[in-house]
């Protein structure tokens, strides 16, 4: 089994897979300290399928063996991931519309940081870093899991362990 180490989330290293924004540390918000109502729009875009509405989903990720046993990708839409109350590790692979486990790498996503995955990027379940469980908001077009999700279980020899 191949082992990989989760990297710090870095704009250049993550650029092939999408983008991210730390929603807990916004410079415009810091400049308005003391205001009782702050709204900062359009921090990142999320390309959705034009036929569907956006759907907010939540995943509760708990402590488990940190092994990637399956991957998925969405052929036509982006996916948004936002850990709400703890840090998580995610894994991603290039958008090639093929499953190539050797191309997968992992990134540490601090709580409050919104990650956008581009269409076609390999990904899957998230893994907690230093808590028992983390609630993760997932943003996708409505019914994506029914109409734009290619799911693949990895052979045992292709499974990957994410090290802490």
Image (tube, rainbow, N blue to C red):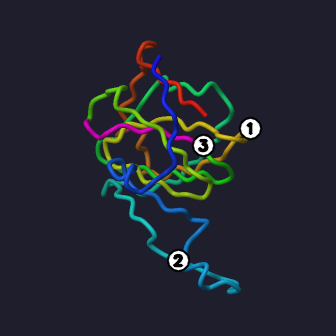
Find the magenta span and give its range.
89-96
User: Is there CB contact under 8 Å for labels 3 and 1?
Assistant: no
Element type at marker 2? loop
Q: Which residue is mark 1?
A: 132
Q: Nearer the viewer, mark 3 or mark 2?
A: 2
Q: CA distance from mark 3 to mark 2?
A: 25 Å
The 10 Å Cα crowd at callout 2, few under 14, some 14 to 19, many 20 or more, is few
Kindly identify the residue that appears in the image at 68 percent across and 52 percent down.
85
Q: CA distance from mark 3 to mark 1?
A: 14 Å
The mark closer to the camera, 3 or 1, is 1
State the residue in front, 76 or 10: 10
Classify residue 115 as left or right of residue 120.
Answer: right
Q: Residue at x 52, y 39 (%)?
A: 6
Q: Residues within 10 Å of mark 1 (few under 14, many from 20)?
A: few
Quadrant into which the C terminus falls: top right
* Earlier-in-chain disc, 3 versus 1: 3
**How many angstroms separate mark 2 from mark 1 (CA)?**
31 Å
Where is residue 115? Give x, y as percent: 47, 54
x, y percentage for residue 20?
46, 58
């Amino acid at each position: 089994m191949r082992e990989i180490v989760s990297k710090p989330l870095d704009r250049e290293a993550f650029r092939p897979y999408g983008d991210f924004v730390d929603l807990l540390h916004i410079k415009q918000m810091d400049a308005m300290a003391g205001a009782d109502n702050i709204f900062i729009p359009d921090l990142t875009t999320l390309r959705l399928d034009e036929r569907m509405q956006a759907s907010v989903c939540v995943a509760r990720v708990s402590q488990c063996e940190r092994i990637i046993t399956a991957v998925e990708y969405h052929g036509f839409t982006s996916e948004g991931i936002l850990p709400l109350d703890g840090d998580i590790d995610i894994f991603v692979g290039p958008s090639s519309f093929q499953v190539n486990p050797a191309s997968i790498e992992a990134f540490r996503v601090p709580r409050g940081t919104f990650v956008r995955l581009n269409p076609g990027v390999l990904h899957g379940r998230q893994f907690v870093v230093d808590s028992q469980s983390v609630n993760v908001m997932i943003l996708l077009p409505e019914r994506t899991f029914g109409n734009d999700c290619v799911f693949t279980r990895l052979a045992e020899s292709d499974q990957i362990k994410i090290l802490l």
